[in-house]
Amino acid sequence: MNRSIHWLLLYFLVIQAATAQTRTGVLAEPVYNYDEAKVGDLTLPDLLRTTAGKQVTSRADWAARRAELLQLFAENVYGKTPAQPVRLQFQTTSIQQNALNGLAIRKQVSIVFTDYPKLPPIEVLIYVPKNAAKPAPVFMGLNFCGNHCVSPEADIPLSTRWVDNAIGEVSVNNRATEKSRGMQERRWPIDTILKRGYALVTAYYGDIEPDHKTGWRSGIRSVLGDTARYNGPQDSQWGAIGAWAWGMSRIMDYIQTDPALDARRVVLMGHSRIGKAAVWAGVQDERIAAVISNESGEGGAALSRRWYGETVERVNTSFPHWFTGRYKTFNQRVADLPVDQHELLALVAPRPLYVASADGDQWSDPKGEFMGALYAEPAYKLYGKTGLGVTTFPGLNQSVGQTVRYHNRTGKHDVTNYDWAQYLRFADELVR
Ligand code: GTR
């Protein structure tokens, strides 16, 4: 065969093979699945059986199993949260007595890291209802784009921290612009929350760690934990989700010092990646009274073994900084994970838990989130409580359950007024 024809043939063969591989997802981004028929059988780890094979039958047994599960999630999924205490200073930078047309007292507080002067503070925005019982129960949650973008008030300083340019024209060179003011106001119906008697406490998640692959260098992980081994294939160092969860606990530290806020009635709400972090914070920090996972999906409320929507491999590939190095070793062998996410949700027990999905957000796997909530039930039973109490997937826009609640609303990946209406009722009934 003529030499150049030979090379041409070889070239076509290679291209063929490469595109075939891309089709099967080997070379391209790892695949996801939207076909229920392809999900296959689901064998979940037994929540009430210890690694040593002991059956959990009492609350005392559960205390030991709970500690074991916390450790397994730390080692395999989120990484170990450094236990060392960190000295904090709470500096009130402004108080507005008549915020939101007299509805609230607004405070801005910087959580300063005394021992790490190079670390910027966590800037906390607090609204306390004026005409409500004090101390006020609290909705707490991190926001995606800075306090200025969730408040309708124009005098909230623009966040000066790194923001994702992908959000749109609202940022330039990874810094927020005036255009982002109020951008996510719709997701935080502050007036409604206040009128129902709750305070709202929020901060930008990027204050704790900027959400990109090397964001750890300017966040809390640059000074806490063994960053030298960051994200190695077997390491159990904490990832960004662990860091955000840690930050939520530091905000809890502040809440405990503020007499206007009831630290024993804090409902932690998190959406999407912040929802993953909220659940992880809620299971580690038992000061948090109740947890709400809004469409937290893979690595949040959705079962990892259920091969639907986003997968372990996919989330680890798109966001390598979120989880621990070891989690990536399960990309192709999810069935070997020593835990699954129903066990994470079970660690919220006996406290109230709300898991919410959206029908237009199949990426988060609504059914997998429902099953996560459902299979947390045995932990609630140990406390004489009913968790979800229903076993069939509910119809759209139907809030079901008791101490554990669930809904799958119509619409896309988002936080809507419908979601908040359910969360406020859930908090009224179970936390107040
Ligand atoms: C997606 C990611 C999800 C979810 C979401 C979000 O791109 O795949 O796991 O966390 O982002 O945070 O909005």
Image (tube, rainbow, N blue to C red):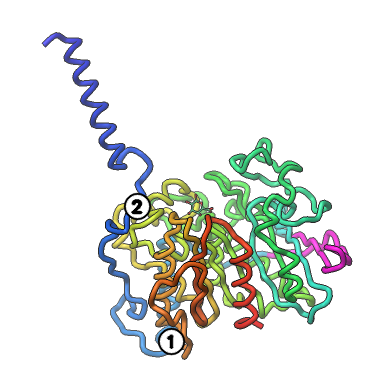
> Mark 2 packing: few (<14 Cα in 10 Å), some, or many (20+)?
some
- Amino acid carrying label 2: it is Asn
Q: Nearer the viewer, residue 228 or 181?
A: 181
Taking the spot 29% from the left edge, 56% from the top edge, the residue there is 333
Task: Specify the quadrant that holds the N terminus.
Answer: top left
On the image, the x and y values in percent for residue 376 come to: 42, 76
Q: Nearer the viewer, residue 341 or 251?
A: 341
Label 1 C-beta lies within 8 Å of the nearest ligand 1 atom: no
Query: Disc 1 designates what residue?
Result: 381
Q: Is residue 193 above or below residue 164?
A: below
Which region is colored magenta?
87-110
Left or right, 324 with respect to 422, comes to left
Query: Which mark is drawn over residue 170?
Result: none
Q: Main secondary structure of the magenta part?
A: strand
On the image, the x and y values in percent for residue 257 come to: 75, 74
Task: Specify the quadrant that holds the C terminus.
Answer: bottom right
Q: Nearer the viewer, mark 1 or mark 2?
A: 2
Query: Disc 2 designates what residue?
Result: 33
Q: Is residue 98 magenta?
A: yes
Tag 1's secondary structure? helix
Tag 2's secondary structure? loop
Using the rendered view, name the quadrant where residue 214 is placed. Answer: top right
- Amino acid carrying label 1: it is Lys
On the image, the x and y values in percent for residue 41 come to: 25, 65
